[in-house]
Amino acid sequence: MNTNTENRGAVYCNEDVWSIFESNLQALQPSSIFVLTDTNTEKLCLPYFLGKIQPTIQWEVLQIPVGESHKNITTCLQLWSALSEKGADRKSLLINLGGGVVTDLGGFVACTFKRGIEFINIPTSLLAMVDASVGGKNGVDLGHIKNQVGLIKDPYSVLIDTHFLLTLPEEEVISGFAEMLKHGLISSEDYWNRVALFDVSKTTEAAKLIWESVEIKQKVVAEDPFEKGHRKTLNYGHTLGHAIESHCLTSAEKKALLHGEAIAIGMILATYISSEMIGFPKEKLDQIARTILKHFEKISFAKNEIDAIIALLKFDKKNANGKVLFVLLKDIGNCKIDCEVTNDLLYKAFEYYENLKKY
Amino acid sequence: MNTNTENRGAVYCNEDVWSIFESNLQALQPSSIFVLTDTNTEKLCLPYFLGKIQPTIQWEVLQIPVGESHKNITTCLQLWSALSEKGADRKSLLINLGGGVVTDLGGFVACTFKRGIEFINIPTSLLAMVDASVGGKNGVDLGHIKNQVGLIKDPYSVLIDTHFLLTLPEEEVISGFAEMLKHGLISSEDYWNRVALFDVSKTTEAAKLIWESVEIKQKVVAEDPFEKGHRKTLNYGHTLGHAIESHCLTSAEKKALLHGEAIAIGMILATYISSEMIGFPKEKLDQIARTILKHFEKISFAKNEIDAIIALLKFDKKNANGKVLFVLLKDIGNCKIDCEVTNDLLYKAFEYYENLKKY
C-alpha cells in the first residue's frame, strides 16, 4: 500500500516498506545516516529495524529520553549539537524511529539543521501512524504550550510497519485509537462504526483500518495543506483537548494524560457543544460518549481546573484575531469550522461530561 | 525600484518603500504587529520608522541585545515566549528592523512560531541590505558555529531605505562593503571597479550601487534557490572567512571581527588559491589584495591559529560527504564551484596574506 511514488511525504504501509526504504537510500545517497530513537524505541524497535535493513554506509544511533516532557528546545539543542559534533553534513539523513514525540521533534531538528537535511519517519506508535505520519507538521512544546514552535514540511517518506504496534503498551494503542475515532467523526459514519470495534491484536484488520485512517487524513491535508480552511476539521476535539492535556501536564493535582486520552475528552465536549449550537443529533451524541467512555478513563475536573483549562484556550495555535475558534459537527462526517463558542457553553459542556456514567 | 510585485520576498529600495509597507499591511491584515529591534536600532532606527508609518492596529516593540553573540537559540526562546505571552497568533506580523542578526534571527523566529507567521524585513545595515535581504536564509549560531540552525524561507517583503545607513558607524559600512566587493568578483569586473570606489556618504550613488548588488544576488538565487550549484558562488571568500570569524569570536588572543572583515580576508585567501590552482591572473590578484587592504585591517595569525582555523573548516554548512569545498575564480566574474583544496595550499595562502603590505 502506498499513496504515491513521486512526491515527498509519500506514506507506505506494511508489505513493501523495507524495499521502499532501500530505494529511498538509493535515491538519496546520503553521506551518513542518523537514527533517532527514544529510550523505549531503542530497546523495543531498533533491533527489528536493524534486522530489516542492510546499511552499507556509516550510521549512528541518537537517543532522547522518552516522553512529551522532553519534546522541547533543550532536547533539540542536544541533537543539533550531537549532529554537529558527529560530523553530519547537508547530505546526511535522519531517520526518526519512534512515536509522535520522536517524529515531531526529529522532523523539526532535520528541517532546521544546516537549513534542512532529509529525513524519513518510521512511526512506531498507533498515534504517530494515523496522525503524525501525514501532513508534515513537526515541532516542539514551549513550556506547557504544545507545538508552539515548529514547521510544516513533509519528510522524504513515511514508512508504516504495523509490526511495531506489538511493542506498545495497551494505553498507547488506546491513545492513537482516539485519532482514528476522530477521523470517523469528521468524515464517515461507516468508518466510525467500524473503528468503534477496532482490535489491534487482529493485525490484518488493524492494518486495513489504519490505512483507511491515513487515507482520510491525506485527503483532508491534500485539499488544504496550509490549514486555511478544511484542514481545520482535523482539529476536532483538539481545542479543548490540547488545553486539557496542557493543564494535566503541569497541574500538581492531575496525572499527565496521553494525547489521545485528552483528545477523547475534547471530542465528547465538542460533540456536546455541537448538539447545543448547530443541531448535532442528541442520540448520536450519547452513542459517541458511550463509545469513548468504553475505552477511555473518565476524569473529574474541579471548578478551578475548568477555569484554568478555559484560560489556556487562548494559546491555541489555531486562533486568529484573538478569537478561540472551534470545529463543530452538524452530523457525523459534516463539519463546520471557525465556530465561536461562549464561555457559558464551555462550562455546560464540562457539566455534561461530568454527569456521564462510566460504562 | 523593486524586483517584482507578485511574489513573496520581493525587495524594494528607497523611493516607494513606505507606500509598499502600507499596501503590505492592507494585503496581510495582521491581527497584531511586533517590531523586533536590537538595543542599537531601537534607539537609532525605530523613531525614523515610526515617523514613516501610521499604525492603526495594535503593535508592540520587542528588543534583543545587540551583537552576533546573542544570535542563538536562547534569544529565540525569549522571543517565542514573549510572542506567546503577548498573545501573538497566526495572523500576527513580525517586522525585523535591524542588521543581519535581527533579520536572520527574527526571520527564524517568525518561520517557526506556531509553525510560521508572516514577517517583513527592514534591513538597517549595509550588510543586511546587500546580503541578508535576498535569498530567504535565516537562522542562528550554535555555540561558535555560525548559522548552524535555520531555514530558507522568504520574508513577505524586504524594504530597503538607505536613510538608515546614516545611523551606522563606519566599521559597519565597511563590513557590508565586503559583500558588495564579492558580488563584483563573482559576477562583473565593471561592477567590481565601480564598487572599489564606493562612498556611502554620497547617498544617490550609494543607493544605485546597493541596488545593483541586490540584483546580482537575486539573479544568482533565482537560478538556484536551494543552493545545488550556481548559488554556491555567493560563498566566495566565506569558507575560510567563516572559520576566521568563528576563531576570532572564541579566541582569547583575538578581538572579534565583523562578518565583512573576516570575509575580506577570506576573499584574499580564496583569490590567491584561485591563482595557484586554476590560473586566476596574478596581476588582478595583487590589485584585489591592494583594494581590500586599503579598506580592511590586516590581521596576523600565528601558526597555531591557522591550524585552528583550518580545523574549523569541517563545520562549514556547504560541505558534503566529508569534503571541504571551495568556490574559486578563473577570472573576475568566472567562478568554479566545488573545488577541493589541499591543506598545504591553505597554509600557503595564509603565508601570502601575511606577507602582503598594508596600504
Image: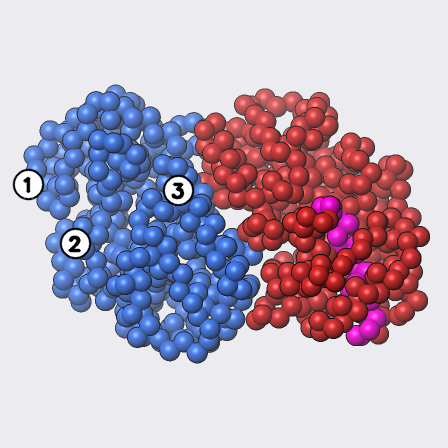
Chain colours: A red, B blue
Q: Where residue B295 appears, x then y in whole percent? A: 13, 46
Residue A183 in view (yes/no):
no
Q: Residue at x 24, y 45 (%)?
A: B258
- Residue annotated with mark 2: B170
Chain bearing mark 1 = B
Q: Which residue is drawn at 93% across and 67% down?
A: A283
Mark-to-mark CA distance, 3 and 1: 34 Å
Which comes sooner in the sequence, label 3 or label 1? 3
The numbered dot on residue B303 is: none
Chain bearing mark 2 = B
The numbered dot on residue B359 is: 1
Image vertical order of residue A89 relative to residue A307, above or below: above
Q: What element carries label 2?
A: helix
- Three-letter code for the amino acid on which mark 1 is drawn: Tyr
> What is the quadrant of residue A288 in the picture?
bottom right
Mark-to-mark CA distance, 1 and 2: 19 Å
> What is the quadrant of residue A56 in the picture?
top right
Q: Are marks 1 and 2 on the same chain?
A: yes
Numbered label tally? 3
Q: Where residue B256 appears, x then y in whole percent? A: 24, 40
Q: What element carries label 1?
A: loop
Q: Residues within 10 Å of mark 2 (few under 14, many from 20)?
A: few
The magenta segment? A255-278
Which comes sooner in the sequence, label 1 or label 2? 2
- Three-letter code for the amino acid on which mark 3 is drawn: Asp
Which one is closest to the eye, mark 1 or mark 2?
2
- Residue annotated with mark 3: B141
Residue nearer the viewer, B108 or A310: A310
